[in-house]
Image: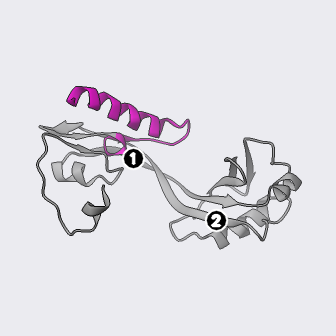
Amino acid sequence: LPAELLDVGSTTFEAKYVVGCDGKPSIVRQALGIPYVGKDYPQAFFLVEMECDPEHMRTLGVDTAEGSIMFGGGSVLLLIHMPGNLWRVIYSAEGVDEKMTVDDLRVVWESLMPLPMPESATFHNPSFFKVSCRIAESFGRGRCLLAGDAAHCHSPAGGQGMNTGLQDAANLAWKLA
């Protein structure tokens, strides 16, 4: 939303259509009373972007890889090389929850990696997510429509989540134009 709409308690405007692209917990879908059927998987994930010295990553042997994955004790640690000195770090294990911190990740790193996490590492955008496989019983009601995760969600494996959401938007755009 534009900044001027975020600075007020409420805004009223008229529109021909409403498209709920407001994610898995969609308030639009809930307001329409459309059931979101499916299931939640027990796996949970901690995700963070790590910026660190590329020399340290070279000593780990992961500097030239697009990604590296480590398994141990029922857990998985995935490192995905992003542009420059940035790495996306994804961790999953039993007991991971929304309270996990970067300090917890350091402990995990020490148990799974051959060398310690670089002290100079900085972290950005830590987040927690659980995976679901759900679909709305209907993609709309009247002139209120759903798209993206508000309409359907599934595992991010394969990168199809964002792609299907963009396809929803493109499909609706030409139909509503």
Q: Is residue 172 above or below residue 50?
A: above
Query: Along the polypeptide, which appears first: circle 1 or circle 2?
Result: 1
Rate crowding at label 2 as few (under 14), some (14 to 19) or many (20 or more) other CA atoms within 10 Å.
some
Judge left or right: residue 96 versus residue 110.
Answer: left
Residue 163 image offset from top left, x and y in percent: 45, 35
* Residue lying at 55% horizontally and 40% vertically, measured from the top left: 157
Residue 57 image offset from top left, x and y in percent: 81, 55
Amino acid type at image mark 1: Lys
Q: Is residue 93 above or below residue 170?
A: below
Amino acid type at image mark 2: Phe
Residue 165 falls inside the magenta stretch: yes
| Prevailing secondary structure class for the magenta stretch in the rendered image | helix
Question: In this orientation, does residue 59 appear?
Answer: yes
- Label 1, label 2: how many angstroms apart (C-alpha)? 32 Å
Residue 8 falls inside the magenta stretch: no
Residue linked to disc 2: 123
Residue linked to disc 1: 39
Judge left or right: residue 46 versus residue 119.
Answer: left
Where the N terminus falls, by quadrant? bottom left
* Residue lying at 33% horizontally and 35% vertically, measured from the top left: 169
Where the C terminus falls, by quadrant? top left
Residue 82 image offset from top left, x and y in percent: 67, 47
Q: Is residue 175 above or below residue 37?
A: above
Question: In this orientation, does residue 76 appear?
Answer: no
Rate crowding at label 1 as few (under 14), some (14 to 19) or many (20 or more) other CA atoms within 10 Å.
few
Magenta region: 148-177
* Residue lying at 23% horizontally and 48% vertically, measured from the top left: 29
* Residue lying at 27% horizontally and 62% vertically, measured from the top left: 4
42 and 9: which is toward the camera: 9
Residue 133 image offset from top left, x and y in percent: 41, 42
